[in-house]
Image (spheres, rainbow, N blue to C red):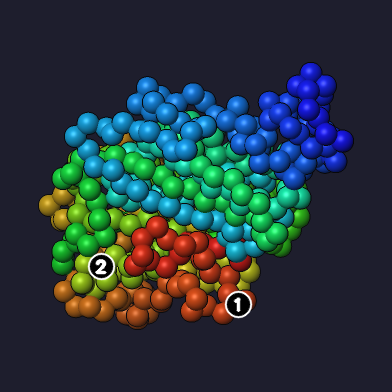
């Protein structure tokens, strides 16, 4: 059946085709994006998207968005793509979770650069069999996170595929020229600090794989790990504060795990590092889970990704300034875990002595059964982020 008159149907049912995209506000259960068609899908997204701010004179609906630059700032641009079966598995995450994660990984990259996010564009590669309800959920999850951080969705692209669901976001932030945080600014003797706690997301995924998604977590810490896996929290405010106050010399987000971040940061600086194993803030839920499962919580925290915490290099003389600034981090702790060294070696200092820091995840070098990160990084020099080939 074809619906050609906007007055004919307020509800679209499976098997209908829609000639007027304005008709598709309500759909019957089981309706797919293939039933709607491209124009109706785009209109459906546009209707759910808030009106852009005044500094976006042209948003969704034209060939390209027009954005007025923030005065006196540089644009910071990042992009990430999530592929079903590689970066997420909908057996473990809801449609809204997928939308949230798609934007969150981009905001985390901007935070690592000290930038304040402003706009995003969304690319959707959709199987025709995708339920419209799932599309709505993904858009809802993305827009909810965007609203929290005042990010305007200003455009994008929709296309069809016979392969897996793919979501990509390009995000743009703003930062003043002398406030940019990069990976290569650290110097020997700078202290290494990390926000929050690590190992939570890896624990959350491991727990989800062992039990039905609807089953409640046995304790609050494990429940928090699961939530951190499903909806990672990019450290947007912290990154902007670090850049604005010039407390840190270098930074990176921990998309692929702490070990990977340490390798990437030290390599960019042309330095090595010594890390105190006892100081690493492993999430309490991760400690209990991996001990109970016969694993090493420290190793899991070092290698596990999707935490999206920030690793920063801070001059010793700025230690007090960082602690003062941390009062504005809204309860997120920041922990000193080591320092950069002139020696190129990366050393993990443990109670049993010193050993080499384990390698981080690297795309294409891992075996097919590996459960490490796989999100392509916005920066060419990085590996990727946690994958849900892990889930």
As displayed, is residue 45 above or below residue 130? above
Q: Quadrant of the N terminus?
A: top right
In this view, the residue farthest toward the top is: 7
**Numbered circle sitting on residue 268:** 2
Q: Position of residue 195 (x, y in %)?
A: 36, 51
Question: Residue at image x 35%, y 81%?
Answer: 355
With 125 as the anchor, is 211 left or right in this view? right
Q: Residue at x 44, y 38 (%)?
A: 64
Task: Characterize the local packing of mark 1: few (<14), some (14-19) or many (20 or more) Cα atoms within 10 angstroms.
Answer: few
User: Residue 19 placed where, x, y %?
Assistant: 74, 32
Residue appearing at x 83%, y 21% in the figure? 8
Disc 1 target residue: 368
Query: Can residue 240 be seen in this snapshot?
Result: no
Depicted 233 relative to depicted 288: above or below:
above
Q: Nearer the viewer, residue 26 or 115?
A: 26
Mark 2 lies on a secondary structure that is: helix
Q: Is residue 40 visible?
A: yes
Indicate the secondary structure of the residue bearing disc 1.
Answer: loop
Q: Is residue 216 left or right of residue 177?
A: right
Instruction: Give the alpha-carbon distance from disc 1 to disc 2, as whole Å.
Output: 28 Å
Whether residues under marks 1 and 2 lie with C-beta atoms below 8 angstroms apart, the answer is: no
Q: Of residues 80 and 63, which is closer to you in this image?
A: 63
**Horizontal arrangement in the rendering, residue 147 relative to residue 350 (left or right):** right
The C terminus lies in which quarter of the figure?
A: bottom right
């Amino acid at each position: 059946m074809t619906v050609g008159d906007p007055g004919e149907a307020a509800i679209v049912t499976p098997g209908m085709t829609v000639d007027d995209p304005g008709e598709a506000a309500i759909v019957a259960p089981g309706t797919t994006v293939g039933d709607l068609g491209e124009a109706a899908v785009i209109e459906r997204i546009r209707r759910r998207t808030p009106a852009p701010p005044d500094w976006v004179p042209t948003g969704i609906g034209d060939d390209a968005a027009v954005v007025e630059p923030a005065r006196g700032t540089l644009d910071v641009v990042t992009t990430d793509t999530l592929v079903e079966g590689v970066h997420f598995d909908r057996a473990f995450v809801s449609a809204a979770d997928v939308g949230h994660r798609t934007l969150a990984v981009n905001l985390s990259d901007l935070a690592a650069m000290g930038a304040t996010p402003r706009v995003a564009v969304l690319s959707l590669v959709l199987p025709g069999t995708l339920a419209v309800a799932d599309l709505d959920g993904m858009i809802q999850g993305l827009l909810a996170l965007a609203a929290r951080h005042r990010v305007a969705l200003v455009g994008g692209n929709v296309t069809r595929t016979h392969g897996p669901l793919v979501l990509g976001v390009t995000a743009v932030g703003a930062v003043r020229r002398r406030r940019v945080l990069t990976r290569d600014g650290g110097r020997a003797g700078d202290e290494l600090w990390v926000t929050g706690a690590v190992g939570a997301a890896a624990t959350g995924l491991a727990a989800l794989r062992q039990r039905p998604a609807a089953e409640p977590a046995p304790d609050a810490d494990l429940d928090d790990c699961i939530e951190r896996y499903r909806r990672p929290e990019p450290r947007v405010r912290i990154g902007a504060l670090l850049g604005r106050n010039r407390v840190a010399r270098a930074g990176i987000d921990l998309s692929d795990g702490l070990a990977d971040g340490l390798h990437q940061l030290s390599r960019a600086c042309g330095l090595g590092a010594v890390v105190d194993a006892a100081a690493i803030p492993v999430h309490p839920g991760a400690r209990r889970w991996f001990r109970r499962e016969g694993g090493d919580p420290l190793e899991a925290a070092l290698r596990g990704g999707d935490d999206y915490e920030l690793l920063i290099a801070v001059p010793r003389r700025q230690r007090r300034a960082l602690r003062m600034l941390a009062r504005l981090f809204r309860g997120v702790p920041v922990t000193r875990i080591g320092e950069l060294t002139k020696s190129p070696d990366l050393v993990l200092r443990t109670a049993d002595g010193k050993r080499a820091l384990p390698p981080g995840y690297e795309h294409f070098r891992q075996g097919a059964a590996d459960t490490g990160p796989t999100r392509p990084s916005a920066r060419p020099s990085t590996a990727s982020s946690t994958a849900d080939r892990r889930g």
